[in-house]
Image (cartoon, grey):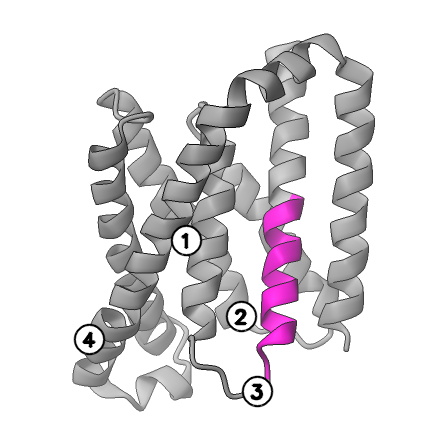
Amino acid sequence: MKDKKKLILGVILFGSVWGGLEAIVTSSMTGTGTFISRSVVLALVSLLVLSYARFVLPRMGSTLAIGLIAAGFKFLGLPTLFMCQLAGVIGQAIVLEIFFSMAQNRGWLHKALPLAGLVVAASYVNSLSFSFSQAYLFQNHWWLDRGVNGLFQWSFVTGSAAALASVLGFAVALWLSKISLTRFERFIEVHHAAFASGTIAVSACFWVAGALLIRV
């Protein structure tokens, strides 16, 4: 399969999986008291999907492209659109694109410890950029009312839990890549049509599930 076609199908597949899982987690954890913060669960899910996706598609820009596809799920909730959720997905994709590209340039993409360290750093950067942008860029009163100290507190309390979840998600993705990446890439190369049709089918399922859940 040509690299361009593989990249396009891979971006659609992983973007749809991430967006669909975001919709499932958000819907299932809305309005219920849970021991684990929804942000933490979303961090685990996003790092699992995006890390594995980067192993499959080691191209600069692929993580950001996947994030843009996933962000499209938020528009399924129109006319009610929560800008914080949209900004959260795109912002995380931008941050991880930068950090994954740094790792790739340094040859760390398959080195567990250096990449895990970058994942932790990316998680804190994401928490800080999200909370402060919501407060002072988007003028979101729910965040603005916290003040600078409250934003830092949220970023480092919830952010620390999210960082731990991110490392766990990355570790699972790394393990999955070691046991399945070669076979997955071989499948893509040998069974072009099956990969293309499978991508369309799986993506469609997640988009339908997302549409149903977001509108509930």
**Residue at 49% from the left image edge and 71% from the top image edge:** 84
Seen in the picture, residue 138 relative to 2 is either above or below; the reply is below
Q: Nearer the viewer, mark 2 or mark 1?
A: 1
Q: Report, in whole angstroms, how far the alpha carbon at label 2 lies from the one at label 1.
A: 14 Å
Query: Reading the chain from its start, which is encountered first: label 2 or label 1?
Result: 2
How packed mark 3 is, by other alpha carbons closer than 10 Å (few <14, some 14-19, many 20 or more), is few
Which segment is the magenta one?
16-30
Residues at circles 3 and 1 in contact by the CB criterion of under 8 Å: no
How packed mark 1 is, by other alpha carbons closer than 10 Å (few <14, some 14-19, many 20 or more), is many
Q: Is 158 situated left or right of 194 in this image? A: left
* Residue 103 position by quadrant: top left
Residues at circles 3 and 4 in contact by the CB criterion of under 8 Å: no
Q: Report, in whole angstroms, how far the alpha carbon at label 2 lies from the one at label 4.
A: 21 Å
User: Can you tell which mark lies on residue 92?
Assistant: 1
Tell whether position 139 is magenta.
no
**Residue at 30% from the left image edge and 67% from the top image edge:** 161
Residue 175 percent coordinates (x, y): 42, 34
Task: Give the amino acid type for the residue marked by disc 4 in the picture.
Answer: Phe
Q: Nearer the viewer, mark 2 or mark 4?
A: 4
* Residue 28 position by quadrant: bottom right
**Residue at 26% from the left image edge and 56% from the top image edge:** 125
Under tag 1, what secondary structure?
A: helix
